[in-house]
Amino acid sequence: MVTGGAIGVGRACAVALASSGVDVALAGRNAERGERTCESLRQMGVDSFFIKCDVADPRQIHEMQAEVARRFGRLDIAVNNAGGGIAQSALEMDSVHWDQMIDINLAGVFWCAQAQAKQMMGQEPCGGKIINIASMYGRIAAGNCAYNASKAAVIHLTRTLAVEWGSYNINVNCISPGWMLTHGNPVDPEWRARMREVTPMGSLIPYSAMYGAVLFLASAASDLVTGLDLLVDGGHTLSTYLHPLHRAVPARISPKQEEAGREQDPL
């Protein structure tokens, strides 16, 4: 199952799993978008259905997991992607927006993971793969204090759950994407150019870059990998760059290809 799977990173994870023959349940708040994505997954030859769920509500999470178990009979892979961001400085931050970020980005991930782990522990054979979506801003700081704090907490929560649940053959890992050109984050061309300049691989992160990461952590290839925070950031977090990085050769992904990648994720 994939939470927040209708668009963006969640949709990319769902597409990657479906491309490998995995039946996928999607959870989210927008039923229309969710149903459209499910239909596109069914066209890939797998079973897919949508569950409306707000991950800030533990009761809805419980109902969501129960429906997945009823429809599929078991749960082998869970991607906890649902989340959001609020651009607000630390001095401007109010309790409503702080609580919203923590409830969605951190508490929502925990309650989902707990429900998923209980399902995985009770099935035969016991075990499964839980993948939490964090962010490179769980490691570096650049404004948006509540978002950064919530994502840093997801990374350490992932390690803690990996320790607790490893004896049940449950792997718990997370993926931290870098700058992605999304519909919700239409960065202007000047900022995008600056982002490329300070990223060693020279481009923003396309949705397709998530495919290999999620398939690795969802498959038997990662059976002995747990507690990992897998960065998919083009190398941005490796250093602090005071000057633009001058490329020796063109980047693998051009600005035109970046934009084309965003258009592959329909609203």
Image (tube, rainbow, N blue to C red):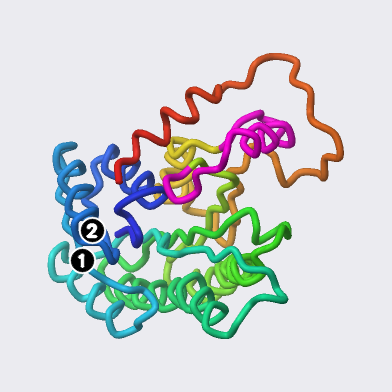
Q: Is residue 136 above or below residue 154?
A: above
Q: Gap in Å between the C-alphas at discs 2 and 1?
A: 7 Å
**Magenta range:** 182-204
Image x and y of residue 140, in percent? 72, 57
Image x and y of residue 38, in percent? 19, 50
Instruction: Estimate how packed mark 1 is, as few (under 14), some (14 to 19) or many (20 or more) residues with alpha carbons within 10 Å.
Output: many
Residue 150: image quadrant is: bottom right
Q: Report the side of 54 relative to 253 (left or right).
A: left
Image depth: mark 2 or mark 1 in front:
1
Q: Amino acid at mark 1?
A: Ile
Q: Secondary structure at mark 2?
A: strand
Q: Report the side of 180 relative to 27 (left or right).
A: right
N-terminal label among 2 and 1: 2
**Along the line of sight, which residue is nearer the eye, 31 or 249?**
31
Q: Give the labeled residue for mark 1.
A: 51
Q: Give the labeled residue for mark 2.
A: 25
